[in-house]
Image (cartoon, rainbow, N blue to C red):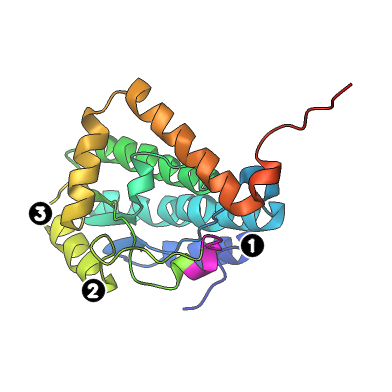
Amino acid sequence: MTCDLADRAATKALATELGSQEIDVLVNNAGLGDMGLFERSSEDKTLGMLEVNVTAVLILTRAILPGMVERGHGGVLFISSGFGLGYLPSFSSYVGTKHFITGMANGLRAELSGTGVTVTQVCPGPVATEFEENAGNFTGQKVPGFIEITAEHCARAAVSGFEWNRAIVIPGLFMKFAMFLNGWTAGFVYRPIAALLGRIARKAQLGPAKTSPSVKSE
């Protein structure tokens, strides 16, 4: 079945149709990204991203989950992002959508304990898909090969973790290490680093002349 998940009416129609069927596993995989300074972002693109990354996930999960609980088996696999566990400048809205998924997945997993329904969240780093191009990479720099993983790698890790009923799956050695550091690094340590990265990103997108407030001389 095809559906434009940025169209809420279409998503609700799909949810109604799927809600009457016996669905064993729901994979919330569709997602959009946006890269750039928040004040220069497109409102329409941001709202469309919220529809796909948040609202559609909520609508489809809410439609299918009751049947799983009633039958006593099934599962929901959330394909999220490493940004669901951390943050980085130039991705503010996207990070927000993924933190929603983290909260929803963790809450649902706790709610569904003992029901026979599995909830797993997958938090990969960069995956070799069209995502980066569609997000609007203004830097012109490619993701280093030792960080990026293939879609096949991500899919295998996701399915394996889901079958083992893991709460969170982090594919790739680099991301496992990065998320380990993220979990053990206090906020006051990372925030200055993030602020520096933010200044670098602002300079890359706007140029040095627009990175600081203008000062008028008398």
Residue in the foreground of this view, choosing between 111 and 82: 82
Q: Does the magenta stretch include residue 16?
A: no
Query: What secondary structure is found at the residue carrying circle 1?
Result: helix
Residue that carries the numbered disc 2 in the rendered image: 152
Q: Which residue is drawn at 44% across and 64% down?
A: 141
Quarter of the figure with the C terminus: top right
Q: Can residue 167 be seen in this view?
A: no
Query: Which portion, as a residue range, is magenta?
Result: 133-139
CA separation, marks 2 and 1? 32 Å
Answer few, some or many: residues within 10 Å of disc 3's Cα (few below 14, many 20 plus, some between 14 and 19): few
Residue that carries the numbered disc 1 in the rendered image: 9
> Residue 179 location in percent, x, y?
24, 42
Residue that carries the numbered disc 3 in the rendered image: 164
> What type is the residue that disc 2 sits on?
Glu
Residue 164 to residue 83: above or below = below
Q: Nearer the viewer, mark 2 or mark 3?
A: 2
Q: Which residue is drawn at 46% across and 78% down?
A: 1
